[in-house]
Image (cartoon, grey):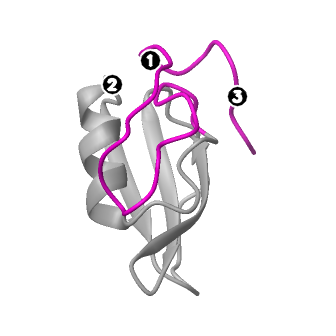
C-alpha cells in the first residue's frame, strides 16, 4: 500500500543541505525520500512531523498493518530506495 498527498504531515520546501545534493521533494510527502542517505531521511521525517519512521533493510520481514503517520523507508547500502506511509 502506498501513501501520497494529503495524508502525511508537514509541508513542502527545498533543503539545499545534506546527502551531497539538493532536496527536491516535499518532506511531508511520504514518497519523496528516495535517494537520500538514511540519516538525512530520518532527520527530515522527524522535522516534518512523521510520528514514527520504520527502516526496512532488504528482505526484512514486516507487518502489513497500516499506521497513519508512520513513514516506511526501504533502504539498501544506507540509501533510501523507496518510501511510503503506513
The answer to whether the residue labelled 3 contacts the one labelled 2, judged by CB atoms less than 8 Å apart, is no
Q: Locate residue 29, reporting x and y percent.
A: 57, 29
In the image, which is nearer the foreground, mark 3 or mark 2? 2
Is residue 62 shown left or right of residue 45? Answer: right
> As rendered, which of 13 and 74 lies closer to the eye?
13
Tell me if residue 34 comes above or below residue 61 in the rendering: above
Label 3 residue SS: loop
Q: Give the residue at mark 3.
A: 4
Q: Quadrant of the N terminus?
A: top right
- Residue 46 location, quadrant: top left
Q: Quadrant of the C terminus?
A: top right
Q: Earlier in the sequence, mark 3 or mark 2?
A: 3
Q: Earlier in the sequence, mark 2 or mark 1?
A: 1
- Residue 77 location, quadrant: bottom left
Q: Give the residue at mark 2.
A: 48
Give the residue displayed 59% in from the left and 41% down from the top: 32
- Tag of residue 9: 1
Q: Earlier in the sequence, mark 3 or mark 1?
A: 3
> As rendered, which of 71 and 37 lies closer to the eye?
37
Q: Locate residue 31, reporting x and y percent.
A: 64, 42
- Region of the chain picked out in magenta, as a range: 1-30
- Tag of residue 50: none
Q: Is residue 45 magenta?
A: no
The answer to whether the residue labelled 2 contacts the one labelled 1, judged by CB atoms less than 8 Å apart, is yes
Amino acid at each position: 500500500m502506498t501513501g501520497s498527498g494529503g495524508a502525511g504531515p508537514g509541508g513542502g520546501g527545498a533543503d539545499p543541505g545534506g546527502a551531497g545534493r539538493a532536496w527536491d521533494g516535499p518532506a511531508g510527502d511520504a514518497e519523496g525520500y528516495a535517494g537520500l542517505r538514511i540519516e538525512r531521511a530520518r532527520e527530515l521525517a522527524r522535522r516534518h512531523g512523521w510520528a514514527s519512521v520504520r527502516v526496512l533493510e532488504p528482505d526484512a520481514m514486516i507487518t502489513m498493518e497500516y499506521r497513519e503517520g508512520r513513514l516506511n523507508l526501504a533502504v539498501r547500502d544506507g540509501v533510501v530506495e523507496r518510501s511510503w506511509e503506513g
